[in-house]
Each structure stands twice: as structure tokens, then as C-alpha cells.
Image: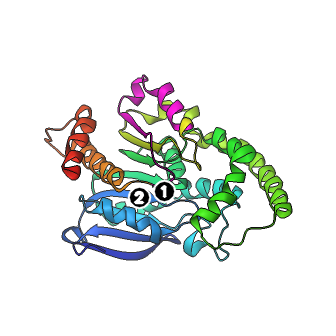
Amino acid sequence: MHTNLISKKLLIDNIPVIEIVPRKLQGQRAPLIVFYHGWTSDKMNGSDFGESIAKFGFRVVVPDCAYHGERNETPLKMWDTHFLFLSIMETATEFGKIIDYYQTEQLIANDFYCAAGVSMGGLITNIIIRTYPGIKAAGVFMASPQLQKFAEWISFVGLEDMFRAAEEFYPGITLPDERLQLGILNKESDLILELLPRLEKFDLSLQPESIAGRPIYYWHAQPDPMAPYEFTADFYEKIKDLPEAKYVYFKGDAEGSHFVPLIETRRLALFLQNSYQAIAVPDSQITKKDIWQRTNEQILEFVR
């Protein structure tokens, strides 16, 4: 933990979270970011992102997503993928509880609160963009805004990748034999397809006008084996000329994998910091149209 940051665990309406805030802002109002971790991860792992963002003047809250961390007595396996979709739906609907808590405690500066997330957490963030008009900005790492399309891909193609990913993410793990793997694939595929109708009302790509002019930053690496890059890239191409998506920005990297480079976490932090200045700070000289250019100019200072 950075010495200028303070971290503490809280239970907000039965949701275990970690709150990270600059020491100088402890107990004071600050712009709020709710950051969501990835599949089979937890708030402790997500707090690494939280610390990187909090250093830029934010209060960052990292919850345990549904069925994860303290909320799951039996650890999930990478291939238990129907729980991924159950988790994102449940966790996204809890966003309002976290915001209500910090509003009641009067700890949100200028009513500026945002959502951001990585992988599964990015799926949750896309749902929040569609369903919570109160958020002021957002950031999404490695997650498809085309939720139903992603679920279909997982069901028909991506499930097999989960076994390979399990070996990569958890060295030494014992996988089921091939015969059992086939049974798992068939079962999970059926369960995911049953969930497809429920996903419709959460699918951002089916209601892109709900972006409503808010600044959003998407990042994805083209070689990503876990979350298809083209789902994010195609979505951006379809919505980029909509007036509601005027401040949506997408950065696709030709190299990489299913990991977020530190520089992109910093870029997100600067993007949200500039969004705060443009949207919420009285008499600011920064406007929405300045956010992206200013962010990329500032990020150069980190690579020189």
C-alpha cells in the first residue's frame, strides 16, 4: 500500500468492499470510483487497480462481486462460466447500494461518481452504463459491450478456452479428464443459453443511446484469448458517430493478452481525473472535448 493512501474494509448492505482513499482526503468528500474485479478474482486483487487510481485524488471502492471473495464459500473454477453471467447481473444491480451509502455519508465530491472494471468487471461496468444514468464517466478494460453476443460466444466457443486459461492463471491446477470436460462444456453451454433472455435488458449494444454523452474509455488488446477484441472494436465502430457517443474513446493495442498494462491503468485514472475536472469542478477551464487529448498529453509524462 502506498504510504499516502489509506485502505479499509467495509460491509455495505452485506457487500464486502475495500475502500482506498488518499490520506489527505480521509473522511472528506472526494470523487468516487467503484472498480470491479475480474472472473474468479476478488476485491483484494482488484485493490491493485484501486490503489493506482486512488493516487490521482479519488476514493476508490472495490467490492467483492457476487459469488466471489467473501461471498463464495466454494471457490469458482474458471469453467463455471454460467456463474459469470449470474454474477454480473447481480453485482450491477448492487451499484446503487454503494452509491447510496456514500451519498448518505456525504463523502462524494460534487456528486461525481463513476464505474470501472476489468474483464468480468468491465462487463459489469457496461451494464451500469446502460442502467444507471447518474454515473458521470466510466472505464472498461477487456470486456464486450455486446453482452448477449459474448454469452453466445462463451457458450459455443469460449468455454474450451477456460480450461486452457485455468492452466495459465493457476499453474499446477488439476483439470478434469477430457471425458469430464465434455460433460462440463455441454452443461455450462446449456445453462448460459438459458440465461440469454435475461441478459437482453443489460446489453449496452442494444441501447447505445443510454451512453448519453458521458465520457467512457475502452481498452482492449487484439490478441486477447479470453474476451474477443472484435466485440469491443465492432461496437465502437457502430456507435462512434452517434451524438450520444461523442465522448467515447477506444484504444486497441496490436500486442498484449488478457492483462492490463500499468500505463493503461494510469491512462484511465487521468481520463477520469480530467472527466471530473470537465464535468464537476466549478469554473474549470477543461471541457468534455478536452478530456481525451489532455489525457494522452499527460500520459506522455509517464513514459519519458
In terms of image quadrants, where is residue 261? bottom left
Coloration mode: rainbow
What residue sits right under mark 2 in the picture? 34
CB within 8 Å, label 1 to label 2: yes
> Mark 2 or mark 1, which is nearer the start of the sequence?
2
Q: Looking at this view, is 162 or 276 the one in front?
A: 162
Task: Describe residue 172's horizontal placement relative to residue 193 as left or right.
Answer: left
**Label 2 crowding class (10 Å Cα cut-off): few <14, some 14-19, many 20+?**
many
Q: Amino acid at mark 2?
A: Val
Disc 1 secondary structure class: helix
Number of numbered discs: 2
The quarter of the picture where residue 54 lies is bottom left
> How far across and how far down the image is residue 35, in percent?
42, 58
- Can the viewer see residue 192? yes
Q: Which kind of residue does numbered mark 1 sit on?
A: Phe
Q: Tell me which residue sits at (37%, 33%) in the image.
A: 213
From the top left corner, tell me how far across and down residue 171 is, in percent.
Answer: 60, 70
Please state the extent of the stretch shown in magenta in the rendering: 231-259
265 or 180, which is in the foreground?
Answer: 180
Alpha carbons under labels 1 and 2: distance apart: 8 Å
Residue 239 on the magenta span:
yes
Q: Secondary structure at mark 2?
A: strand
- The residue at the point 59 percent across, 54 percent down is 88
Q: Is residue 198 visible?
A: no
Vertical side of 219 occupied by 95: above or below: below
Query: Above or below — where is 273 with respect to 247?
Result: below
Name the residue tied to disc 1: 95
Q: Check residue 122 for magenta coloring.
A: no
Residue at point 32%, 52% (across, down): 263
